[in-house]
Amino acid sequence: MSESNNLIVTIERAASILQEGGLVALPTETVYGLGANALDPIAVARIFAAKERPFFDPLIVHVPDIDWMPRIVSEFPRVAVQLAERFWPGPLTLVLPKVPAIPDLVTSGLPNVGVRIPDHELTRQVLRLANVPVAAPSANPFGRLSPTTAEHVYQQLGLRVDAILDGGPCRVGIESTILQIDKHGVTLLRPGGISLEEIEALIGTVNLPESTVSKTPIAPGMLASHYAPRTPLKIVNEIPSSVESSRTGLLVLCNDTELQQFAKIELLSPTGSLVTAAANFFQALHRLDAAGLDEIIAVRFPDRGLGRALNDRLQRAEHRGVHQSK
Ligand code: AMP
Ligand code: MG
């Protein structure tokens, strides 16, 4: 008798936990995923907190059927229809322009979202019952082995998940193939469970960016195309009492003092919650970037929990700010 039994739930219970913003480990044909309602930014932030990942990376959104596509993506071109009809349900992720309802935390601020229909009947039933799309990375803490049984999930994440749906052992080791579809055509972002040969036999030549043909895989979250503000961004340890330009914006976790030196202020969480801050982070950065500012001042987050991922993201935004002119 395994200890993980305490967390094992029925598909009905798994669906209602997802609807309530909880975390449910779900079986797929690749590995167990750590799922949350993809439309609820706080639930999505809890995924990153549970994984203790020191950075954010875009999450794949899982849906049960192809008629859900308009809820996730704003375009579904013919070539996507062809690929979906042939390979879904299955280990193929399509990256397409997202609808506004998909929070930026799901896509790490990118305008596109990765979506797929997993080939696992129990999980598809949960998705249908919950009636929400589910964002899910693998259900393991950062740097640990991907789980292929419910027991692995329990051993690695324990009570950091609200529930586990036991679908037995996964067919091991095949991550989904990721294809981006845009004006450049179809581009392979990650090789995986569906071979390039099978894909090209159906739709013709697929673009291979240098990074995917090179031996070094793109580290998750390190994609060059990640959103960075066009406005220069500077990281500081505390809120400065004076600033150079009257067109300066502030990004900060929380604050209870008078701040007249800033043209625009984004407070991420009134209570200082890093989970809430992560849920609001990308949207806040977008709003600051759209405000026509000369500079964004961002106050470093506490170096714990999701603060580490937020600081990582800030550091990359700062780098871009220095090299890109407005
Ligand atoms: P995993 O959850 O381990 O299968 O990894 C998901 C990976 O999918 C991420 O690390 C990205 O490389 C990729 N991905 C997901 N969504 C997107 C997106 N919107 N644009 C580009 N790549 C994506
Ligand atoms: Mg993973």
Image (cartoon, helix red, strand yellow):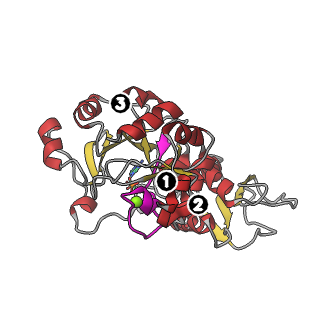
Q: Which residues are magenta?
A: 134-153
In this image, 230 relative to 153: left or right? right
State whether label 1 is within 8 Å of ligand 1: no
In this image, 311 relative to 200: left or right? right
Q: Position of residue 64 (x, y in %)?
A: 40, 34
Mark sitting on residue 63 = none
Distance between the alpha carbons at the discs numbered 2 and 1: 33 Å
State whether label 2 is within 8 Å of ligand 2: no
Q: Position of residue 292 (x, y in %)?
A: 64, 49
Task: Count the labels in the image.
Answer: 3
Q: In the rendered view of the protein, which quadrant contains the C terminus?
A: bottom right
Distance between the alpha carbons at the discs numbered 3 and 1: 22 Å
Mark sitting on residue 76 = 3
Q: Check disc 3 and report its element: helix, strand or loop.
A: loop
The overriding secondary structure of the stretch rendered in magenta is loop
| Residue density around tag 3, few if under 14, some if 14–19, many if 20 or more, within 10 Å | some
Q: Give the quarter of the image for residue 185.
A: top left
- From the image, tell me which residue sits under label 1: 227
- From the image, tell me which residue sits under label 2: 159
Q: Is residue 33 above or below residue 130?
A: below
Residue 229 in view of the camera: no
In this image, 84 relative to 220: left or right? left
> Identity of the amino acid at label 2?
Leu
> Identity of the amino acid at label 1?
Tyr
Q: Position of residue 77 (x, y in %)?
A: 31, 30
